[in-house]
Protein backbone atom coordinates (compact mmCIF):
# COMPACT_ATOMS: atom_id res chain seq x y z
CA UNK A 1 0.00 0.00 0.00
CA UNK A 2 1.18 3.46 -0.84
CA UNK A 3 1.29 5.47 2.35
CA UNK A 4 1.54 8.79 0.55
CA UNK A 5 -1.97 8.34 -0.85
CA UNK A 6 -4.73 9.27 1.53
CA UNK A 7 -7.29 6.53 1.38
CA UNK A 8 -10.77 7.85 1.80
CA UNK A 9 -12.95 4.71 1.79
CA UNK A 10 -15.66 6.55 -0.09
CA UNK A 11 -16.72 3.77 -2.44
CA UNK A 12 -18.34 0.54 -1.33
CA UNK A 13 -15.54 -1.38 -3.03
CA UNK A 14 -12.89 0.46 -0.98
CA UNK A 15 -14.87 -0.11 2.18
CA UNK A 16 -15.36 -3.81 1.54
CA UNK A 17 -11.68 -4.05 0.80
CA UNK A 18 -10.88 -2.48 4.18
CA UNK A 19 -13.29 -4.83 5.95
CA UNK A 20 -11.85 -7.91 4.31
CA UNK A 21 -8.36 -6.79 5.38
CA UNK A 22 -9.56 -5.72 8.84
CA UNK A 23 -7.76 -2.47 8.13
CA UNK A 24 -7.56 -0.56 11.40
CA UNK A 25 -6.61 2.61 9.51
CA UNK A 26 -10.19 2.69 8.32
CA UNK A 27 -11.57 2.63 11.86
CA UNK A 28 -13.60 5.74 12.43
CA UNK A 29 -13.97 6.41 8.70
CA UNK A 30 -17.04 4.19 8.39
CA UNK A 31 -18.86 1.26 10.01
CA UNK A 32 -20.37 -1.87 8.58
CA UNK A 33 -23.57 -3.60 9.63
CA UNK A 34 -24.31 -7.27 9.12
CA UNK A 35 -27.90 -7.92 8.11
CA UNK A 36 -28.00 -11.48 9.40
CA UNK A 37 -26.96 -10.53 12.95
CA UNK A 38 -28.20 -6.91 13.01
CA UNK A 39 -24.87 -5.92 14.60
CA UNK A 40 -22.54 -3.20 13.34
CA UNK A 41 -18.73 -3.10 13.62
CA UNK A 42 -15.56 -1.16 13.02
CA UNK A 43 -13.66 -2.21 9.89
CA UNK A 44 -10.94 -3.88 12.01
CA UNK A 45 -13.34 -5.95 14.12
CA UNK A 46 -11.91 -9.38 14.87
CA UNK A 47 -15.25 -11.17 14.71
CA UNK A 48 -16.02 -13.58 11.89
CA UNK A 49 -16.19 -11.88 8.52
CA UNK A 50 -19.63 -11.56 6.96
CA UNK A 51 -20.49 -12.30 3.36
CA UNK A 52 -20.36 -9.28 1.12
CA UNK A 53 -24.06 -9.49 0.23
CA UNK A 54 -25.06 -9.19 3.92
CA UNK A 55 -23.13 -5.99 4.57
CA UNK A 56 -24.35 -2.38 4.76
CA UNK A 57 -22.00 0.56 5.21
CA UNK A 58 -22.54 3.61 7.41
CA UNK A 59 -20.50 6.75 7.93
CA UNK A 60 -21.55 7.22 11.54
CA UNK A 61 -22.53 4.93 14.40
CA UNK A 62 -25.75 6.91 14.75
CA UNK A 63 -26.72 6.12 11.16
CA UNK A 64 -26.11 2.41 11.79
CA UNK A 65 -28.26 2.50 14.93
CA UNK A 66 -30.98 4.44 13.10
CA UNK A 67 -31.05 1.63 10.55
CA UNK A 68 -31.72 -0.85 13.37
CA UNK A 69 -28.22 -2.18 14.08
CA UNK A 70 -26.82 -2.80 17.57
CA UNK A 71 -23.25 -2.01 18.67
CA UNK A 72 -20.91 -4.98 18.40
CA UNK A 73 -19.77 -5.98 21.87
CA UNK A 74 -16.40 -6.96 20.59
CA UNK A 75 -15.17 -3.87 18.76
CA UNK A 76 -17.44 -1.37 20.50
CA UNK A 77 -17.99 0.83 17.46
CA UNK A 78 -19.91 3.39 19.49
CA UNK A 79 -16.94 4.53 21.50
CA UNK A 80 -13.44 3.78 22.55
CA UNK A 81 -13.10 0.41 24.21
CA UNK A 82 -13.51 0.85 27.96
CA UNK A 83 -9.84 0.34 28.68
CA UNK A 84 -8.71 2.98 26.24
CA UNK A 85 -11.32 5.27 27.67
CA UNK A 86 -9.80 4.83 31.14
CA UNK A 87 -6.29 5.55 29.90
CA UNK A 88 -7.53 8.52 27.93
CA UNK A 89 -9.15 9.94 31.05
CA UNK A 90 -5.98 9.33 33.04
CA UNK A 91 -3.88 11.14 30.45
CA UNK A 92 -6.36 14.00 30.40
CA UNK A 93 -6.09 14.27 34.19
CA UNK A 94 -2.31 14.32 33.97
CA UNK A 95 -2.28 16.81 31.10
CA UNK A 96 -4.81 19.09 32.73
CA UNK A 97 -2.32 20.55 35.14
CA UNK A 98 1.35 19.92 34.61
CA UNK A 99 2.10 21.90 37.77
CA UNK A 100 0.49 19.23 39.84
CA UNK A 101 2.13 15.90 40.58
CA UNK A 102 -0.51 13.24 40.82
CA UNK A 103 0.31 10.09 42.72
CA UNK A 104 -0.94 6.80 41.38
CA UNK A 105 -3.50 6.69 44.18
CA UNK A 106 -4.83 10.15 43.35
CA UNK A 107 -4.95 9.31 39.70
CA UNK A 108 -6.77 6.03 40.22
CA UNK A 109 -9.29 7.88 42.39
CA UNK A 110 -9.84 10.32 39.58
CA UNK A 111 -10.58 7.62 37.01
CA UNK A 112 -12.27 5.14 39.38
CA UNK A 113 -10.00 2.16 38.81
CA UNK A 114 -7.75 0.40 41.30
CA UNK A 115 -4.15 1.66 41.33
CA UNK A 116 -2.84 -1.76 40.38
CA UNK A 117 -5.16 -2.09 37.43
CA UNK A 118 -4.51 1.46 36.30
CA UNK A 119 -0.74 1.05 36.47
CA UNK A 120 -0.85 -2.08 34.30
CA UNK A 121 -3.37 -0.69 31.87
CA UNK A 122 -1.54 2.59 31.49
CA UNK A 123 1.77 0.86 30.86
CA UNK A 124 0.21 -1.45 28.33
CA UNK A 125 -1.44 1.32 26.35
CA UNK A 126 0.99 4.21 26.74
CA UNK A 127 4.18 2.20 27.19
CA UNK A 128 5.30 3.97 30.35
CA UNK A 129 3.96 4.30 33.88
CA UNK A 130 1.86 7.34 34.85
CA UNK A 131 4.82 8.63 36.84
CA UNK A 132 7.14 8.33 33.85
CA UNK A 133 4.49 9.94 31.70
CA UNK A 134 4.32 12.97 33.98
CA UNK A 135 8.08 13.21 34.08
CA UNK A 136 8.28 13.04 30.30
CA UNK A 137 5.61 15.73 29.94
CA UNK A 138 7.50 18.03 32.26
CA UNK A 139 10.77 17.25 30.54
CA UNK A 140 9.26 17.94 27.12
CA UNK A 141 7.74 21.22 28.28
CA UNK A 142 11.06 22.24 29.69
CA UNK A 143 13.04 21.28 26.60
CA UNK A 144 10.58 23.23 24.47
CA UNK A 145 10.86 26.32 26.58
CA UNK A 146 14.64 26.13 26.74
CA UNK A 147 14.95 25.66 23.02
CA UNK A 148 12.73 28.68 22.46
CA UNK A 149 15.24 30.58 24.49
CA UNK A 150 13.12 31.14 27.59
CA UNK A 151 15.33 31.67 30.60
CA UNK A 152 15.76 28.71 32.91
CA UNK A 153 13.85 30.08 35.90
CA UNK A 154 10.83 30.98 33.83
CA UNK A 155 10.94 27.75 31.83
CA UNK A 156 11.12 25.52 34.91
CA UNK A 157 8.15 27.17 36.52
CA UNK A 158 6.17 26.98 33.29
CA UNK A 159 7.03 23.32 32.92
CA UNK A 160 5.62 22.49 36.32
CA UNK A 161 8.72 22.21 38.43
CA UNK A 162 7.60 24.80 40.95
CA UNK A 163 10.95 26.35 41.57
CA UNK A 164 14.34 26.18 39.93
CA UNK A 165 15.90 24.40 42.89
CA UNK A 166 13.16 21.79 42.90
CA UNK A 167 13.68 21.40 39.20
CA UNK A 168 17.40 20.89 39.50
CA UNK A 169 16.76 18.05 41.93
CA UNK A 170 14.50 16.17 39.60
CA UNK A 171 14.59 17.56 36.12
CA UNK A 172 18.17 16.74 35.45
CA UNK A 173 17.29 13.09 35.76
CA UNK A 174 14.29 13.58 33.54
CA UNK A 175 16.20 15.60 31.01
CA UNK A 176 19.41 13.62 31.26
CA UNK A 177 21.45 16.78 31.42
CA UNK A 178 21.28 19.82 33.61
CA UNK A 179 18.75 22.11 31.88
CA UNK A 180 21.03 25.06 31.42
CA UNK A 181 23.47 22.78 29.68
CA UNK A 182 20.92 21.12 27.49
CA UNK A 183 20.01 24.45 26.05
CA UNK A 184 22.24 24.41 23.04
CA UNK A 185 24.91 21.84 22.38
CA UNK A 186 26.25 21.98 25.89
CA UNK A 187 26.21 25.76 26.35
CA UNK A 188 27.46 26.68 29.82
CA UNK A 189 28.94 23.25 30.32
CA UNK A 190 32.52 22.15 30.71
CA UNK A 191 33.31 18.89 29.00
CA UNK A 192 36.55 17.17 29.83
CA UNK A 193 37.77 14.57 27.40
CA UNK A 194 40.64 12.39 26.42
CA UNK A 195 41.35 9.70 23.92
CA UNK A 196 43.51 6.62 24.11
CA UNK A 197 44.62 3.76 21.92
CA UNK A 198 43.00 0.42 22.76
CA UNK A 199 42.79 -3.04 21.24
CA UNK A 200 39.69 -1.79 19.39
CA UNK A 201 41.27 1.35 17.99
CA UNK A 202 40.98 4.75 19.56
CA UNK A 203 38.49 5.43 22.30
CA UNK A 204 37.33 8.89 23.30
CA UNK A 205 35.79 9.42 26.71
CA UNK A 206 34.15 12.73 27.63
CA UNK A 207 32.53 13.77 30.89
CA UNK A 208 30.66 16.67 32.40
CA UNK A 209 30.80 17.40 36.11
CA UNK A 210 27.85 15.04 36.48
CA UNK A 211 29.09 12.04 34.57
CA UNK A 212 30.19 10.47 31.33
CA UNK A 213 28.51 12.05 28.31
CA UNK A 214 30.33 10.23 25.54
CA UNK A 215 32.28 7.05 24.90
CA UNK A 216 33.08 6.49 21.25
CA UNK A 217 35.41 4.33 19.19
CA UNK A 218 37.16 5.13 15.93
CA UNK A 219 40.25 4.58 13.84
CA UNK A 220 41.31 8.18 14.11
CA UNK A 221 41.58 10.13 17.35
CA UNK A 222 41.27 13.44 15.47
CA UNK A 223 37.94 12.45 13.96
CA UNK A 224 36.62 11.45 17.37
CA UNK A 225 37.52 14.85 18.77
CA UNK A 226 35.85 16.55 15.81
CA UNK A 227 32.68 14.61 16.49
CA UNK A 228 32.77 15.73 20.11
CA UNK A 229 33.39 19.32 19.06
CA UNK A 230 30.29 19.17 16.94
CA UNK A 231 28.03 17.54 19.54
CA UNK A 232 29.14 19.90 22.29
CA UNK A 233 29.84 22.88 20.08
CA UNK A 234 28.92 25.42 22.75
CA UNK A 235 30.53 23.70 25.70
CA UNK A 236 33.93 24.55 27.00
CA UNK A 237 35.93 21.53 25.93
CA UNK A 238 39.06 20.71 27.88
CA UNK A 239 41.40 17.86 27.07
CA UNK A 240 42.40 16.32 30.39
CA UNK A 241 43.95 12.87 30.37
CA UNK A 242 44.61 12.80 34.09
CA UNK A 243 41.06 13.55 35.07
CA UNK A 244 39.69 10.86 32.78
CA UNK A 245 42.35 8.25 33.50
CA UNK A 246 40.07 6.22 35.81
CA UNK A 247 37.43 6.01 33.09
CA UNK A 248 39.92 5.00 30.42
CA UNK A 249 41.16 2.36 32.86
CA UNK A 250 37.65 0.97 33.15
CA UNK A 251 37.32 0.78 29.38
CA UNK A 252 40.63 -1.03 29.12
CA UNK A 253 39.83 -3.45 31.91
CA UNK A 254 36.59 -4.18 30.15
CA UNK A 255 38.31 -4.83 26.84
CA UNK A 256 40.74 -7.17 28.59
CA UNK A 257 37.92 -9.08 30.20
CA UNK A 258 38.98 -8.20 33.74
CA UNK A 259 35.91 -6.05 34.25
CA UNK A 260 32.40 -7.04 33.22
CA UNK A 261 30.39 -4.08 34.46
CA UNK A 262 30.78 -0.36 34.24
CA UNK A 263 30.15 1.73 37.26
CA UNK A 264 30.37 5.09 35.60
CA UNK A 265 27.95 7.86 36.39
CA UNK A 266 26.34 8.83 33.09
CA UNK A 267 25.18 12.24 31.96
CA UNK A 268 23.22 11.65 28.82
CA UNK A 269 20.05 13.13 27.37
CA UNK A 270 17.29 11.03 25.87
CA UNK A 271 13.60 10.78 25.27
CA UNK A 272 11.63 8.61 27.67
CA UNK A 273 11.51 5.81 25.11
CA UNK A 274 15.25 5.82 24.54
CA UNK A 275 15.85 5.83 28.27
CA UNK A 276 13.76 2.71 28.56
CA UNK A 277 15.61 1.00 25.73
CA UNK A 278 18.96 1.95 27.20
CA UNK A 279 17.87 0.67 30.62
CA UNK A 280 16.90 -2.63 29.01
CA UNK A 281 20.27 -2.85 27.27
CA UNK A 282 22.04 -2.39 30.56
CA UNK A 283 20.20 -5.39 31.96
CA UNK A 284 21.56 -7.77 29.32
CA UNK A 285 24.13 -9.80 31.22
CA UNK A 286 27.75 -9.79 30.13
CA UNK A 287 28.36 -12.50 27.55
CA UNK A 288 24.72 -12.69 26.44
CA UNK A 289 22.84 -11.15 23.56
CA UNK A 290 19.24 -10.20 22.84
CA UNK A 291 17.39 -9.56 19.61
CA UNK A 292 15.95 -6.16 18.77
CA UNK A 293 12.46 -7.59 19.10
CA UNK A 294 13.23 -9.03 22.54
CA UNK A 295 14.29 -5.57 23.67
CA UNK A 296 11.15 -4.10 22.13
CA UNK A 297 9.15 -6.60 24.17
CA UNK A 298 11.14 -5.91 27.30
CA UNK A 299 10.28 -2.22 27.10
CA UNK A 300 6.61 -3.03 26.57
CA UNK A 301 6.43 -1.93 22.93
CA UNK A 302 6.76 -5.21 21.03
CA UNK A 303 6.11 -3.57 17.67
CA UNK A 304 8.67 -0.82 18.08
CA UNK A 305 11.56 -2.91 16.75
CA UNK A 306 12.80 -0.16 14.46
CA UNK A 307 12.65 2.44 17.18
CA UNK A 308 14.69 0.08 19.35
CA UNK A 309 17.29 -0.22 16.60
CA UNK A 310 17.47 3.54 16.28
CA UNK A 311 17.79 3.94 20.05
CA UNK A 312 20.73 1.51 19.88
CA UNK A 313 22.25 3.48 17.02
CA UNK A 314 22.00 6.70 19.00
CA UNK A 315 23.70 5.30 22.09
CA UNK A 316 26.20 7.98 23.13
CA UNK A 317 28.24 5.77 25.45
CA UNK A 318 29.74 2.60 23.98
CA UNK A 319 30.14 -0.31 26.44
CA UNK A 320 28.57 1.56 29.36
CA UNK A 321 25.29 0.98 27.56
CA UNK A 322 26.06 -2.33 25.89
CA UNK A 323 24.20 -1.88 22.62
CA UNK A 324 26.69 -4.32 21.09
CA UNK A 325 24.73 -7.10 22.84
CA UNK A 326 21.73 -6.57 20.58
CA UNK A 327 21.76 -8.66 17.42
CA UNK A 328 19.27 -9.86 14.85
CA UNK A 329 16.93 -12.73 15.62
CA UNK A 330 18.92 -15.31 13.67
CA UNK A 331 22.14 -14.14 15.32
CA UNK A 332 23.28 -11.80 12.54
CA UNK A 333 25.13 -8.85 14.02
CA UNK A 334 23.00 -6.16 12.32
CA UNK A 335 24.59 -2.75 12.79
CA UNK A 336 26.89 -1.04 15.24
CA UNK A 337 27.48 2.64 15.62
CA UNK A 338 31.21 2.06 15.98
CA UNK A 339 31.56 -0.51 13.20
CA UNK A 340 30.65 -4.18 12.88
CA UNK A 341 34.17 -5.55 13.37
CA UNK A 342 34.21 -3.92 16.81
CA UNK A 343 30.85 -5.40 17.66
CA UNK A 344 32.06 -8.84 16.65
CA UNK A 345 35.27 -8.42 18.65
CA UNK A 346 33.35 -7.31 21.75
CA UNK A 347 30.94 -10.25 21.58
CA UNK A 348 33.83 -12.66 21.01
CA UNK A 349 35.72 -11.29 23.98
CA UNK A 350 32.66 -11.44 26.22
CA UNK A 351 31.95 -15.02 25.18
CA UNK A 352 35.55 -15.99 25.90
CA UNK A 353 35.55 -14.43 29.31
CA UNK A 354 32.35 -16.13 30.34
CA UNK A 355 33.69 -19.48 29.21
CA UNK A 356 31.10 -19.88 26.47
CA UNK A 357 32.20 -20.59 22.93
CA UNK A 358 31.78 -17.73 20.51
CA UNK A 359 28.77 -19.18 18.78
CA UNK A 360 26.91 -19.51 22.05
CA UNK A 361 26.43 -15.79 22.38
CA UNK A 362 24.57 -15.70 19.12
CA UNK A 363 22.63 -18.87 19.90
CA UNK A 364 21.40 -17.49 23.18
CA UNK A 365 19.46 -14.91 21.19
CA UNK A 366 16.30 -16.89 20.82
CA UNK A 367 16.17 -18.05 24.41
CA UNK A 368 13.55 -16.57 26.64
CA UNK A 369 14.78 -17.97 29.91
CA UNK A 370 17.02 -15.00 30.59
CA UNK A 371 14.37 -12.37 30.44
CA UNK A 372 15.73 -9.00 31.39
CA UNK A 373 15.86 -8.92 35.16
CA UNK A 374 15.01 -5.55 36.64
CA UNK A 375 18.29 -4.88 38.38
CA UNK A 376 18.18 -1.16 37.69
CA UNK A 377 15.63 1.50 38.38
CA UNK A 378 13.67 2.11 35.17
CA UNK A 379 14.97 5.60 34.50
CA UNK A 380 17.57 7.94 35.90
CA UNK A 381 20.49 6.53 34.02
CA UNK A 382 22.57 9.42 35.16
CA UNK A 383 22.02 8.59 38.79
CA UNK A 384 23.73 5.28 38.52
CA UNK A 385 27.03 5.94 40.11
ZN1 LIG B 1 -17.37 -5.84 15.94
Image (spheres, rainbow, N blue to C red):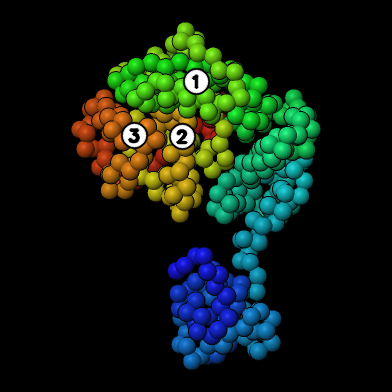
Q: For numbered disc 2, what is the local secondary structure?
A: loop
Q: CA distance from mark 1 to mark 2?
A: 14 Å
Give the CA separation, mark 2 to mark 3. Answer: 13 Å
Q: Are marks 1 and 3 in contact (CB under 8 Å)?
A: no
* Dot 1: element: strand
Q: Is mark 3 within 8 Å of ligand 1?
A: no
User: Which element carries disc 3, helix, strand or loop?
Assistant: loop
In the image, residue 46 sits, relative to residue 171, either above or below, namely below
Residue in the picture at 39% in, 20% down: 221
The image shows residue 380 at horizontal and vertical percentages of 57, 31
Q: Nearer the viewer, residue 324 or 4?
A: 4
Residue topped by disc 2: 315
Mark number, residue 206: 1
Asked whether the residues under the numbered discs 1 and 2 touch, taking CB atoms below 8 Å apart as contact, a structural biologist would say no
Q: Position of residue 47 (x, y in %)?
A: 48, 76
**Quarter placement of the N terminus:** bottom left
Give percent across and percent down for residue 332. 28, 44
Quick check: 277 above or below 127?
above
Amino acid sequence: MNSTVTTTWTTEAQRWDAVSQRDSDADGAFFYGVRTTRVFCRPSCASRQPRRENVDFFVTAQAARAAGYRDCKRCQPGGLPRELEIVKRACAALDADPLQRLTLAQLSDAVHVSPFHLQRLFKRVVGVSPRQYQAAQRGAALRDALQRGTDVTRATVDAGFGSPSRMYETASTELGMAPSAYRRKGAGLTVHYTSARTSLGFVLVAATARGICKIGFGDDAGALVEELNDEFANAERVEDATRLAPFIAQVEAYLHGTRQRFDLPLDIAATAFRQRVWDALRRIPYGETRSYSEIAEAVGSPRAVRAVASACASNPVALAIPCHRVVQKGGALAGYRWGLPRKAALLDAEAQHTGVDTGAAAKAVGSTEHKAAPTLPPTHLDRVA
